Image: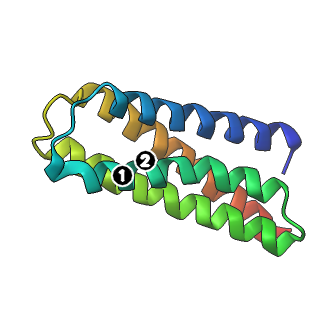
Amino acid sequence: MSEEKACDIKIRAYHFSKAIINLISKTKIERLYFSIVDQLIRSATSIGANVVEAKAGSSRKDFRNFYTIALKSANETKYWLCLIRDTEVIGVDKEIVKELLKEVDEISKIIASIIININKE
């Protein structure tokens, strides 16, 4: 994997995490939805954190494992965003949620591609 590609996904995951945090910070969340929002923030920020950890991995296996965790976090993030999109969370901009879903889908495809390439080497 090229250094440029790793940097791109790291930056992209970071900006995605920021966008999730900004969305939630601008929304008055009812108590009923606290756990969903908490899980969303945890999974979304985990993507970038694991990509960064992969870079510091001590072996190829370590590198691959962190990317696998990042992919799982991206998939979990899709679940929480879909749940927010399809429920009555008041104040959440559904158009922004749709954009975030598209972005996390692209991020997960990039991470999956990196994992596939690691396994080929």
Q: Give how far apart the Cα atoms at labels 2 and 1 are.
A: 5 Å
106 or 120: nearer the eye?
Answer: 106
Task: Please rate how many residues cluster around mark 2, counting C-alpha atoms within 10 Å: few if below 14, some from 14 to 19, many from 20.
Answer: some
Which residue is rendered at x = 37% and y = 56% of the image? Answer: 39
Are discs 2 and 1 less than 8 Å apart at CB?
yes
Which residue is rendered at x = 61% and y = 58% of the image? Answer: 112
- Where residue 13 sits: x, y (%)? 60, 40
Asked whether residue 67 is in view, the answer is yes
59 or 29: nearer the eye?
Answer: 29
> Which numbered circle lies on residue 41?
2
- Where residue 87 sits: x, y (%)? 13, 46
Residue 117: quarter of image: bottom right
Against 31, is 64 above or below? below
Amino acid marked by disc 1: Asp
The residue that disc 1 covers is: 38
Element class at badge 2:
helix
Amino acid marked by disc 2: Ile
Against 36, is 58 above or below? below
